[in-house]
Image (tube, coloured by chain):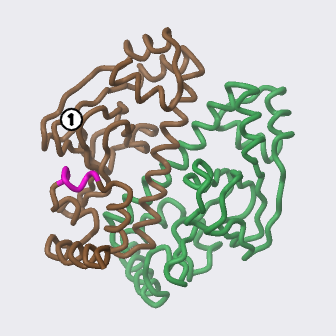
Chain colours: A brown, B green
């Protein structure tokens, strides 16, 4: 098994024929750190599967960008509304490390969906995975303070702390880098006591 | 066709056998206005399909509830993280009109998914629909002011204005009822000029 099939197999086990179809359907693409993968205003025609690196989801808010999420290995990425309805996307994606993605174009996905019902199951599970990500994000944005969200981030994506520039974590929490430093000091003091 | 099959058929056309399976799989349930359908802290074992009325999604924020979305006829409702991982949900759903739902339990869904690949397609489309709702919501929460969100609500779900109590719309926008009145006056003045 390889870097594509192994993580996909944890979603749905594929037989050798299905693995070949999938390998033929995807195109691998590398992005350098800081490179923008997809920009607001474009129409999404592709879905991505992340096998190496880290990608941030962000929105433009009157000229400033606001980070909403960090994707890591094994995650699907798709600007759903834009992809489904062919409208310009509101979100952007940027590599914040050297990153490798497998790209699935719309025609390639449609061909896979017709080739085996297994890909229909895979598509559903991939969309569920992304839905759960968004449901968690929305719940956190609505119900939690910046400090509570920092603690949640530590507990669920703590390994990202060394990887993600602090300004993006501050933007994700909706605070300034100075406030993030104060939150960190407070939380770590509480955890040590 | 009936109130269940007709809207479902707009997602995926079902043959007579599949329609019967679906009819046998669901249970219809009525809720009175104000009745809570599902509460935070419960584990979701069901998915809902709304055929009549209006349901609000809300979160408890330190004793106050915060409205995040309004579901109307033809929409699926599911507390995804809780349903998928069996963890307590963070969200609650309440009927804000007399409401009728078709309930699909987890075993009923699993049986349908095995019965015909059509239900796998339906499940994917239902999840995509909910994902798009959440992606829009998150983008709006992050990028827009209360006034901009009011205008977006008017443009996309304007028919709800007569149906939804104003305090929930204010809570959805994250403002007080007094601020909502001021926003309304400002927007309507702009639209008339």
Q: Is residue A48 left or right of residue B90?
A: left
Residue A94 at x, y percent in the picture:
21, 44
**Near-viewer residue (A60 or A118):** A118
Q: Pick out the residue farthest to the front.
A: A193
Query: Height in image: A27 above or below A10?
Result: above
**Near-viewer residue (A180 or B146):** A180
| The C terminus of chain A sits in image quarter | bottom left
Per the image, the residue denoted by label 1 is: A99
**Near-viewer residue (A71 or B149):** A71
Magenta stretch: dominant secondary structure: helix
Residue A116 at x, y percent in the picture:
57, 16
Write down the region rendered in magenta: A159-164
Residue A33 at x, y percent in the picture:
13, 41
- Badge 1: chain ID: A
Number of numbered discs overlaid on the protein picture: 1
Look at 49% across and 40% down and name the residue there.
Answer: A127
Q: Is residue A75 left or right of residue B114?
A: left
Q: Pick out the residue farthest to the bottom.
A: B178
């Amino acid at each position: 098994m390889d870097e594509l099939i192994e993580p996909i197999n944890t979603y749905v086990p594929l037989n050798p024929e299905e693995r070949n179809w999938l390998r033929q359907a995807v195109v691998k693409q590398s992005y350098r750190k800081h490179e923008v993968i997809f920009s607001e205003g474009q129409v999404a025609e592709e879905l991505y599967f992340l096998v190496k690196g880290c990608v941030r989801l962000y929105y433009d808010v009157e000229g400033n960008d606001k980070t909403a999420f960090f994707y890591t290995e094994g995650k699907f990425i798709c600007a759903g509304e834009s992809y489904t309805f062919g409208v310009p996307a509101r979100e952007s994606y940027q590599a914040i490390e050297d990153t490798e993605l497998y790209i699935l174009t719309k025609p390639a996905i449609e061909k896979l969906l017709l080739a085996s019902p297994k890909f229909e199951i895979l598509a559903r599970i991939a969309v569920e995975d992304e839905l759960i990500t968004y449901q968690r994000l929305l719940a956190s944005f609505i119900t939690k303070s910046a400090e509570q969200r920092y603690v949640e981030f530590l507990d669920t994506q703590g390994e990202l702390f060394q990887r993600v520039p602090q300004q993006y974590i501050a933007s994700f929490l909706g605070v300034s880098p100075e406030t993030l430093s104060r939150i960190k000091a407070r939380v770590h003091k509480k955890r040590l006591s």
